[in-house]
Amino acid sequence: MNLLRRKFDEVLRSLLPVVVLVMLLSLTLVKADEQTIANFLLGALLLLVGLGIFLLGVDLAMIPIGTHMATEVATSKSIWRIALLAFLMGLLVTVAEPDLQILGAQVEAASGGAISGRMMVFLVSVGVGFLITLGTIRLLSGKMSYAMFMALAYAGILILSIFVSEEFLAISFDSSGATTGALTTPFILALSAGLSKVKGGKSTEEDSFGMVGVMSAGPMYALMLMSIITGQKKIVGFPAATKTLSAIELFPHELLNAVIALAPLCAMFFFLNFIHFKAPKREIMGIIKGIIYTIFGLALFLTGVNSGFMDMGKLIGARIAGNYLWLLPGVGLMLGAIVVLMEPAVIVLGHQIEEVTGGRIPLNMIRLTLSIGVALAIGCSMLRIMIPSVKLWYFLLPGFLLGVILSFQADPVFVGIAYDAGGVASGPMTATFVLAFAQGAAMQIPTANVMVDGFGVIAMVAMAPVLSIMILGAIFRHKEATVPEKTRQPLPASAHLAGKIQDYDCVIAILEKGLADEAVALARETGARGATILNGRGSGGQHMHLFSFEVQKEKEVVFWLVDARITDKMAQHIHDSLDLGSQGSGTVFILPSGAIGLDAPVTIGQSPRHMSAERETES
Amino acid sequence: MFVIVNRGNANQLLQVVQHLGALRGTIFLGEGTVPSRWANWLGISKTEKEVLLIAVPDELRNNLYSLLRQRFQMHKRYKGIVFSVPYRAFHPETGTHRPFNRYEDAPYVCLMTVVEKGLGQECMAHARAAGAQGGTIIHAHGAGVPQDFYFPLVIEPQKEIVLIVTKRENATAIRDNIYTQMQLERKGSGILFALPVTQTLGLYEEWQQERRAT
C-alpha cells in the first residue's frame, strides 16, 4: 500500500460520514434542490482528491522545510540571529495568508476606512512573528514550562480584552483563526517538531507541539493593542461577500491564492538553502515536487469546499432553524463531531502525534476527544443563537480558564497538543461549512445577529479542543505510572582494549522512555562508542486502558555495535546500573554480528555535520 | 525476531502472538521501499510500515511461525516479512563469558546500515543495484552530542537505519556496493553490519521458490 493510497484512504474515511450525514439531512428534513446536492457531491469529490494530494505535499515539502529551518534557527551562534530568523518566519508565513487578506479588507470596509486593511495584516504578522520568537526562545532555553508560557499569554489577552469592545474581541478571535490557515499550520507544526529534535534531551516529545497555539495568540495581541491605541471601538455592519462561484471559476483564484501564500516562505527557504545549508539535490527536487502538490491539493480542496459545501451548509442551517428549531443543537452537534476530522491541519497534527510519540498515544483517542469537544462547541453555539441572553463569553471565559488550570495538571505532551488543536480545529472547513451553517440558522432567527454569532462559532471551535484535550491529558497523567528515579553505580575501571577487533556484537537495549541517554553514557564508560536510538512503543508488563483505547508504554531502543570482547561487560554494566532486573523495566539483548565476515573495515564515528560543527567551534 | 507489517497492523499481531506465551514486543515505525520509477518520480515511493521486535524463546519459535503463516498469511506477498536473528538476553547469572555461536552458515543475512537522515532511499537504490529485493527504513537518532550554540543544546543527529534481508550469496556484493557507493570509509558517514538470519517467512525470494515448487 503506497503513501498516496493511504492518504486517500484516510481522507475517505473522514469524508464518508460527512457525505452520508449531509445527504441524509438533505433528502429528509432539508429537502435540498438538485443543483445544491450536485454541487455538494462534486465538492466532496474535489475535496477528496485535493486533500489527499495536499497531505502528500505536506509530507514531501512542508515537513522537510520546517525541519531544515528549525535546525538553522537552533544552531545559530547568537541570540539575535535566533530572534531574527524566528521573527521573519512568523512574519512571512502570516503576511501572505489569503484568509487574513480577506479579513483585512472586511475590517477596512466595516470601519469606514479608519483602519487600513494592509496595516491590519501587517500588524497581525508582526504579532505572530513576535510570539513565534518568544516561543522559540522558550523552547530552546527550556527555562519556562509551556503551560506557564501559555497561561501568561492568555492572562495578557484577558487583561487586554477588558479594554476592547465586544466586536473587536470577536474580530481578534477570528483573525487568530484566519492566521492558522491550512497552508501555514503544517509548516509551524514541523518547525516545532524540528526545533525539539535539534534540542534533544528529555522534553523532546512535549516540545514537539504547541507552536501553533503560541502563534494563534499573536493576532489577538496585535488587534487588541491596535484597538486600544487607535481608540477604534465601533465596527458596524460587515459586508457579507458571499457570492458563490462555480468550481471552474473558483479554481484559478484559489490556485493563485495558494501560490501567493506559500511564496514568501519558499523564497526564504531557498535563499537560506542557497547561502547556507545546501541540502542535497535529490532532497530539493523532492521538496519542489512537494510544494507543487501542496499548492494544487489545497487549491482543489478549497475549491471543493467553497463551491459545494458553503451553499449546502447555509441551506441546512436555514431549513433546520426555520422548520425544526428544536433540532438545531442536535444537528450542530453531529456536524461538529464529524466535520472537524476533515480539517487538513487536524490530519497533519494527527500524523505528527503518531510520529513523535512512536504511536504511543493512540491517534483515535485524540480524534475522538477532538470530535466531542468541537461537537459540544457547535451545539452550544446553536443554543446561543437561539437564546440571545446567553453571551459568548459565558462559554469562552470559563472554558479557557479551566483549560489553563488543567494545563498544569495534564501530561506535558497533551498540553502542547491541546493548544495546537485549538488552532488547527478552526481551519477552512469550520470557516466555510460550519460558519455557513451557523449564518444560515442565524438568518432565520430574528433575535440573532448574523455577523457576531458567526464569529462566535469560530471562537468556540478554537476553545473547545483546548479544554477537551486538556481534560484527556489530566486523566492520562492521573492513570500513568511514573518512572522511578534510578540510582547509578560507578564503574570501577574503564576498559579499553588493545589489538585488532575480531568480532562485533550488536547489542540492543530496550528501555523505558528517558533512559536511553543514560544507557549510552554507561556504554561509553565501558568502551563502546556511537549508538543509535529508536523511539518505539512496547508491550510487556501491564497495559493501561483509557476509554477502551489501549495505551502502550513508550520505549526507547538503543543499538550499539561493539567489540565482542566488551559485550558482556557492557551489558552487565547497563543491567546493573539501570537496575533492569525488576519487572518490566527493560532488557538487553545481544545479537552476533559479522555474519559475512569483516574483511572491510567498519567505521564508527560522528556524523559529518557534527564534525564540521566541531571544527567551527574550534576555530 | 523481526516482523515487518503495514502500518496499523502491528498491535493486533502482537496481541495475538502474546497469547502463545509471555512474549514481549516493541514496535517502531518504519517505511518500506518500492522499486517503481513512476512512483519514484511522483515522489510517492514511500510505504508506511511498522517494525515489531519480539523476543522469542527457541521452544516457541515453530509455533509462532505456523501461527503467522496460518492466521496472518505472512507467506503471501505484500503481507510483510518475518525473520529471526539468534540472540541471547543478558541475564546476570547466565549471561557472562559464554562462547557465542556466530552462525556463519545461516541461509539469510540481515544487513543493517545506519546513515544520515535522507540517505536511506539512496542507500536502498545501491543495494538494489547489487541484487537486493527490498528493504525497510527506520527513523532513528544518534546519541546526543552536547553542543555549544547560543543555547546549550544536546543535538541528536537524525539517522536512518536501512534493514535489508537477503540471501547469503548476495550479501557480500550488496554490502560492498553500499560500502563503496555510500562512501562509508569516510569517518562519520555511516556504519554497516550484518546479522545472521536463521529463519524467514514472506521474503520475495522465498515466495518465488514456493511458487516454482507448486
Image (spheres, coloured by chain):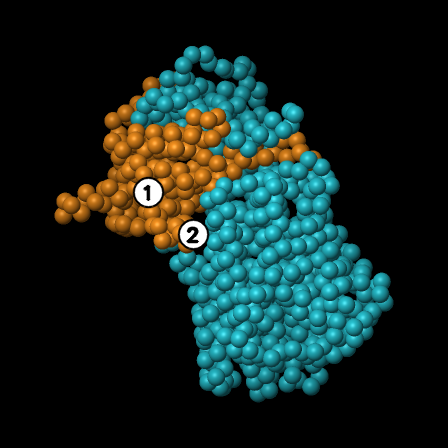
Write down the quadrant of residue A619 in the picture.
top right
Provide residue B39's location: percent of width, then percent of height: 37, 53
Q: Which mark is residue A552?
A: none
Q: Are marks 2 and 1 in contact (CB under 8 Å)?
A: no
Q: Which residue is drawn at 35% across and 48% down?
A: B34
Residue A55 shows in the view: no
Q: Residue at x 55, y 40 (%)?
A: A278
Asked if A50 appears above or below A110 in the picture, the reply is above
Tell me which chain the residue with mark 2 is part of.
B
Letter of the orange chain: B
Q: How far apart are marks 2 and 1 (CA)?
A: 18 Å
Say what amino acid the circle numbered 1 marks: Gly
Find disc 1 in the rendering and name its residue.
Answer: B134
* Extreme residue toward the top, this view: A498
Q: Residue at x 39, y 58 (%)?
A: A5
Q: Which of A274 and B87 is in front in this view?
A: A274
Provide residue A319's location: percent of width, then percent of height: 56, 85
Tell me which chain the residue with mark 1 is part of.
B
Q: Which of B57 and B173 is in front in this view?
A: B173
Find disc 2 in the rendering and name its residue.
Answer: B43
The answer to which of marks 2 and 1 sits earlier in the sequence is 2
Helix, strand or loop at label 2? It is loop
Helix, strand or loop at label 1? It is loop
Letter of the cyan chain: A
Q: Residue at x 48, y 48 (%)?
A: A285
